[in-house]
Image (cartoon, grey):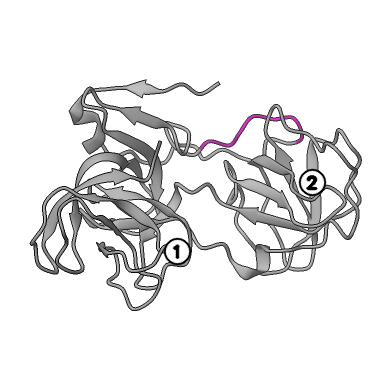
Amino acid sequence: MGTLLYGPESEVFNQYAAVSPAPGDNGSGGQIAQRGVQALGQQLILADGSKFRFARAGELLVLGEVLQAFDTPATDISMAAVATAIGSRTISFTHGGATTVINFFAEGWAIVSLDPGQGNRYKIASHLALTSGGADVVNLAPGHAVRGAALTTTSDVTLVNHVCDGVITMPATPLAALAGVAVLAIASGSFGWIQTRGIASVIMAASTVSGNNVGCLLAAGTAGAVAPLSAATQPVVGVAQVGGLSAGMTGAVNLMIDG
């Protein structure tokens, strides 16, 4: 079972390569194919209360930029399930797209989108490469098995990566969930810590007002930057600690992404 980590300030500036050899398909009932030295989303808390999450970079991260999760491909959304009995440690479905590499969704989730079984989420341990149009399989993590109702061909399945898997710069129009803020230039495919709580240095898209919420605009924003919010639906990144900074500068923001 995962635990909170408490560490020194220096740990958040460490960068880690993927584990070698890369984990394979562990089969039904097997362990999670963890690709980093920590589980994706592992939380690290510093003495001052600042919080960080362990993440895999989907591109070279830029210091101070706001990051989003990987945008799930349309071909992995709402796929027809294969009939699966309660208690099964695997879920099968008809994959909708081109080949997806082995363990692409490891540490992520299989979400049942329609009844029977609608609303259930299952943590993915591992899987072989997923092929176009094939009846593919994901292995469920320990502690997970099909529950509540057996799946049928009407039980659509959607696969999603962990929020901390393949993080990228939040684009001008957000495409996925808010993940954190880059504190290190982590190379694409490498692992490290992104900040989710506490005072952070964040790139500004516009002049901010101290004490006001800042976040990501839903359209026509600035990629990777925060601005004063103008609508309740805009994702809140945090509260500006200092105001009056112009666009392109980095300013102090008390992050509120994480609890």
For residue 202, which quarter of the picture?
bottom left
Give the residues drawn in magenta, as a range. Answer: 28-34
Residue count near mark 2 (Cα–Cα under 10 Å), binned few <14, some 14–19, many ≥20:
many
Foreground residue among 18 and 55: 55
106 w.r.t. 50: above or below: below
Quadrant where the image shows the C terminus: top left
Q: Position of residue 199 (x, y in %)?
A: 20, 41
Q: Position of residue 158 (x, y in %)?
A: 69, 57
Residue 58 in view in this figure:
no
Q: Is residue 100 left or right of residue 183?
A: right
| Residue type of the residue flagged with mark 1 | Thr
For residue 75, which quarter of the picture?
bottom right
Task: Tell me the residue at 67%/33% (across/down).
Answer: 141
Which structural element holds mark 1?
loop
| Residue type of the residue flagged with mark 2 | Ile
Residue 247's label in the rendered image is none
Task: Tell me the residue at 13%/57% (across/down).
Answer: 250
Residue 91's label in the rendered image is 2
Which residue was labeled with disc 1?
233
Residues at circles 1 and 2 in contact by the CB criterion of under 8 Å: no
Q: Could you tell me how far apart the alpha carbons at marks 1 and 2 are, in whole angstroms? A: 34 Å
Q: Position of residue 24 (x, y in %)?
A: 61, 40
34 w.r.t. 117: above or below: above
Which structural element holds mark 2?
strand
For residue 36, which quarter of the picture?
top left
Tag nearer the camera, 1 or 2: 1
Task: Tell me the residue at 91%/51% (across/down).
Answer: 83
Q: Residue furthest bottom?
A: 220
Magenta stretch, main secondary structure, is loop
